[in-house]
C-alpha cells in the first residue's frame, strides 16, 4: 500500500540500517510505522544520521498496543495513526509527524533547528503542518523548539516571497509595488502588503500564519484588516505558500482577474503608500 511517494529515488539503505528498521517493525507488530529520525532519513533529510548509524529506531503504534520501549526501539503511541508512505519497502510516517516525534526526543537546539528548517527549505512540507504537529505534541512550551519554529516560519516566508516574485514574472503580470505599508492621509496605519498595484487598487497578502494557540486572534486580525481595506475599495487577494507552490498558474489567474475587474469598481479611497 502506498499513500504517498518519495520526492526522488533514494540510494539503497545500508544493510545494517535496513535490518534495524525491519527488526523494529517486527517488534512493534502489525500497523506500526517508522517515525522520528528513522523516518526522516528515509524521507531524504540530509541533516539526520545515516540509516546505518541510527542506534535507536522510533516506531509509531496504535495507542492501545501494550508494549514498552527497549534499548533499540522507542515506542511512540498515536491516538489516530496518520497516513503512511512506503519508502524503500518500509511504512513511514509523514514528515510533520516524524518531525514532532524526533523533536520530542531531542534536546540539542542546533539539531532541532536544522531539522525543522530543512523540512521547509527541502520542500518536504509547509510550515503550518509542522507547527500543528508540534502543538499537538505539546512541544511549543520548550524554548529551543520555539526558537526553531521562529526560524522555520522565517524560512517559509522567504520561500513564499520568492514564489510570489516568480509567479509575477512567469505569468507576465504587471509589476507591483513590493512590500509596502498603506496609510490614510494623516490617519491610521492600514497594514503591510506583500504586493500592491496602486492603479488598480489590488493587493496581495501572503498568508504565512502557522497555527498556534492564539490562532483565533490572528485570524480575527487578518479578517479585520482585509475588511477595512475592502471598505476603502482595495481588493485583497490572500495567497498561501501551498497554493503558490502547487497551483501558481491558477493563483496568477486570480490576481489577473482582480486587476482586470478594477475598471468596473468604484474608485478607491486615496491612500498613502510607503515602503515597508
Image (spheres, rainbow, N blue to C red):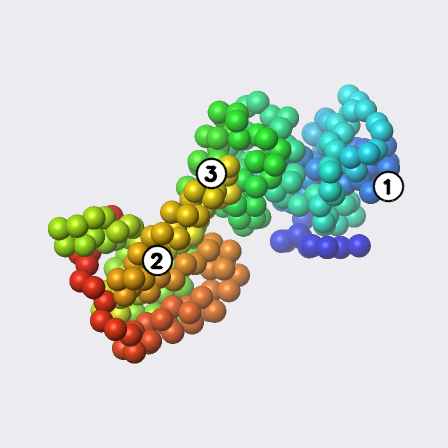
Determine whether label 3 and label 2 are within 8 Å by CB: no
Determine whether label 2 and label 1 are within 8 Å by CB: no
SS for dot 3: loop
Res 97 quadrant in image: top right
Q: CA distance from mark 3 to mark 1?
A: 38 Å
Give the mark nearest the N terminus, 3 or 1: 1
Name the residue that disc number 2 marks: 227
User: Marks 2 and 1: which is nearer the front?
Assistant: 2
The answer to whether residue 90 is left or right of residue 45 is: right
Residue 102 image offset from top left, x and y in percent: 63, 32
In the displayed structure, would residue 30 be above or below residue 242? above
Residue 24 image offset from top left, x and y in percent: 81, 33
The reply to whether residue 87 is visible in this rendering is no
Q: Residue furthest left?
A: 186
Residue 27 image offset from top left, x and y in percent: 86, 32
Give the mark nearest the N terminus, 3 or 2: 3
**Residue drawn 30% across the image and 78% down it:** 264
Labelled disc at residue 180: none
Labelled disc at residue 214: 3
Name the residue that disc number 1 marks: 30
SS for dot 2: helix
**Residue drawn 61% across the image and 36% down it:** 136
The reply to whether residue 257 is visible in this rendering is yes
User: Marks 3 and 1: which is nearer the front?
Assistant: 3
Residue 254 image offset from top left, x and y in percent: 42, 69
- Disc 2 crowd rating (10 Å Cα; few below 14, some 14-19, many 20+) is some
Q: CA distance from mark 3 to mark 2?
A: 20 Å
Along the line of sight, which residue is nearer the eye, 139 or 269?
269
**Residue drawn 57% across the image and 22% down it:** 107
Along the line of sight, which residue is nearer the eye, 158 or 275?
275
- Disc 3 crowd rating (10 Å Cα; few below 14, some 14-19, many 20+) is few
- Disc 1 crowd rating (10 Å Cα; few below 14, some 14-19, many 20+) is few
Amino acid at each position: 500500500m502506498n499513500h504517498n511517494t518519495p520526492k526522488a529515488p533514494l540510494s539503497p539503505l545500508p544493510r545494517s540500517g535496513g535490518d534495524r528498521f525491519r527488526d523494529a517493525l517486527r517488534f512493534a507488530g502489525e500497523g506500526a510505522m517508522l517515525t522520528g529520525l528513522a523516518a526522516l532519513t528515509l524521507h531524504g533529510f540530509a541533516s539526520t544520521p545515516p540509516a546505518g548509524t541510527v542506534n535507536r529506531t522510533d516506531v509509531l503504534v496504535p495507542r492501545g498496543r501494550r508494549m514498552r520501549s527497549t534499548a533499540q526501539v522507542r515506542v511512540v503511541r498515536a491516538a489516530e495513526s496518520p497516513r503512511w508512505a512506503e519508502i524503500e519497502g518500509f511504512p513511514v510516517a509523514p514528515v510533520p509527524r516524524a518531525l514532532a516525534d524526533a523533536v520530542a526526543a531531542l534536546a540539542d537546539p542546533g539539531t532541532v533547528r536544522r531539522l525543522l528548517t530543512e523540512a521547509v527549505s527541502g520542500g518536504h512540507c509547509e510550515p503550518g503542518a509542522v507547527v500543528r504537529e508540534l502543538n499537538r505534541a505539546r512541544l511549543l512550551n520548550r524554548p529551543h523548539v520555539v526558537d526553531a519554529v521562529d526560524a522555520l516560519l522565517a524560512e517559509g516566508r522567504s520561500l513564499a516571497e520568492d514564489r510570489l516574485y516568480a509567479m509575477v514574472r512567469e505569468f507576465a503580470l504587471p509589476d507591483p509595488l513590493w512590500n509596502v505599508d498603506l496609510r490614510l492621509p494623516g490617519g491610521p496605519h492600514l497594514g503591510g502588503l506583500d504586493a500592491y498595484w496602486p492603479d488598480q487598487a489590488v493587493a496581495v497578502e501572503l498568508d504565512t500564519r502557522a497555527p498556534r494557540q492564539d490562532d483565533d486572534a490572528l485570524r480575527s486580525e487578518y479578517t479585520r484588516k482585509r475588511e477595512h481595506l475592502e471598505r476603502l475599495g482595495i481588493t485583497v487577494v490572500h495567497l498561501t505558500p501551498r497554493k503558490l507552490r502547487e497551483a501558481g498558474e491558477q493563483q496568477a489567474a486570480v490576481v489577473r482577474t482582480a486587476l482586470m475587474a478594477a475598471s468596473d469598481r468604484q474608485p478607491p479611497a486615496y491612500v498613502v503608500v510607503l515602503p515597508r
